[in-house]
Amino acid sequence: MVLDEDYKNGIIWQDIQHQRLLSTIKSLANSAVAGRSDKELFYKTIYFLKEYISCHFATEELYMTKYGYPGIKNHLEEHHLFIEDFKKFISQSIYSAKESATLLNSLNVWFVNHIKGTDRQLAKFLLDRAKI
Ligand SMILES: [Fe+2]
């Protein structure tokens, strides 16, 4: 899968956090393409995602609440599902090339569907309506 890197939504804090996730996805993808088994990268990605979930989701949720975002219910449901899927994944997964590929695939799907879809709608609202 070739990742479309047009991830910028125009909100600086959101774009910076998304860029970090994109870098992580690219590292995993490069490792897979090279046919390398990279245990360290796998666990670094898990660690990064724990931090990403607590920091990035909380920031988005703060802005949604503060500015009365009408799409908050759906957006929070997507965050909640991601957290649940991630918790399930880390409770069942120890490193293997297959698990790393599963993680990469789910992050690709998340990037395309949530960051370029749901998060883009939020960014548009914050820029157009909340004028941040
Ligand atoms: Fe989000």
Image (cartoon, grey):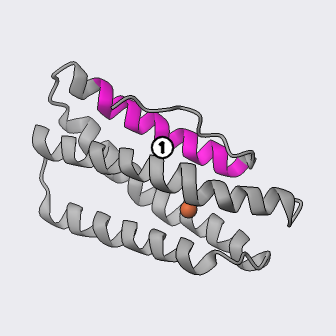
Name the residue that disc number 1 marks.
21
Q: Is mark 1 within 8 Å of ligand 1?
A: no
The part of the image, by quadrant, that contains residue 7 is: top right
**Which one is in front, 40 or 29?**
29
Q: Which residues, given as a range, are shown in magenta?
A: 13-30
The residue depicted at 57 percent of the width and 60 percent of the height is 118
Q: Position of residue 11 (x, y in %)?
A: 74, 49
| Ligand 1 visible in quadrant | bottom right
Q: Position of residue 92 (x, y in %)?
A: 13, 64
In the image, residue 28 lies in the stretch drawn in magenta = yes
**Taking 29 as reference, is 113 left or right?**
right
Neighbourhood count class around disc 1 (C-alpha, 10 Å): few under 14, some 14–19, many 20 upward: some
Q: Name the residue type under label 1.
A: Leu
**Taking 61 as reference, is 50 left or right?**
left
In the image, residue 36 lies in the stretch drawn in magenta = no
Q: Position of residue 93 (x, y in %)?
A: 14, 57
**Which one is in front, 56 or 69?**
69
Q: Is residue 96 visible?
A: no
The residue depicted at 68 percent of the width and 62 percent of the height is 122
The residue depicted at 48 percent of the width and 38 percent of the height is 22
Q: Quadrant of the C terminus?
A: bottom right
